[in-house]
Amino acid sequence: MTAEATLSHAAARALYDRIGRWQDTQRFYEDLATTELIAQADLERAHAVVEFGTGTGRLAERLLRDHLPGTARYFGIDISVTMVRLAHERLAPWKDRAQVEQSDGSPRIAAASGTFDRFVSTYVLDLLSTEDIAAVVEEARRLLSPEGLLCLVSATHGRTAVERIVMGLATRLHSASPTLVGGCRAIDLQTFVKPDHWRVVHHGVVTKWGIPSEVLVATPAPART
């Protein structure tokens, strides 16, 4: 994988502190992919969910309201002060079982190994450096129970002519300045989910308005003896 210029942690925090509620305007292409992720994540049987990059809390609200059992716990982190505040406001109806904290941008999450049975991250890994993406995926493996699920969505590379035009433009904008596209770029999630560490249970690409999104669900592979 070729190294690409990505936002520093400080730059990402500043950008998303500025964007605030405007992030939700991206739902015009995000919702189709997150709906597919939800359909594959078996959330009705989840007990503890961690979300890496909770944003405004829009997905967390959807999960808590419509999909998670009434006893399931939710824990989210985000690098942005603004996003953490917005998520707190949005998740107030579930304050007894939903917690959101600000992170320093590190892939590390302060929780014991095996604490969660779902690790969710949507449209966040495509902001990160390849080193940070790999570290987040490994942290997910540490945090998940043996039967847990890694649940990811990201922008990905175009396959059709229209997708290649749209993502080609996005790539040029990202090359000029990552902030022009919110720091996001096309990545290939599957390259970070190593076969000796994970067993992929769902993988697909959905497209809305010419923007392709990769949806991936995997479970930790049993340790080799």
Image: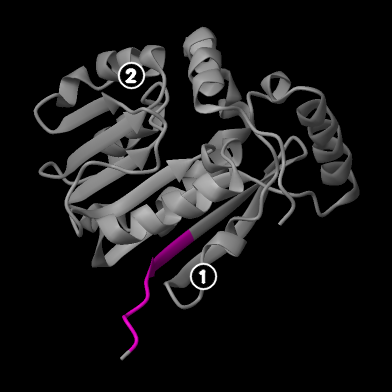
Q: Label 2: few (<14), some or many (≥20) within 10 Å?
A: many
**Where does residue 141 sit, x and y in percent of width and height?**
34, 61
User: If the image is split into quadrants, where does the N terminus sit?
Assistant: bottom right
Q: In x, y percent, where is residue 133?
A: 52, 48
Bin the neighbour count of mark 1 within 10 Å (Cα to Cα): few under 14, some 14-19, many 20 and up: some
Q: Please give the residue where the numbered disc 1 appears in the rendered image.
A: 194
Q: Is residue 151 magenta?
A: no
- Residue 150: x and y in percent read 39, 57
Label 1 amino acid? Lys
Which stretch appears magenta?
217-224
Q: State whether residue 82 is above or below residue 67.
A: above
| Foreground disc of the pair 1, 2 | 1
Q: Residue at x 80, y 39 (%)?
A: 167
Marker disc for residue 102: none
Measure how far apart labels 1 and 2 are at the Cα level. Answer: 31 Å
* Residue under the point 31% across and 29% down: 61
Image-based side of 70 in relation to 131, left or right: left
User: Depth check: 202 or 223 in front?
Assistant: 223
Quick one: 78 or 151, which is closer to the camera? 78
**Residue 75 quadrant:** top left
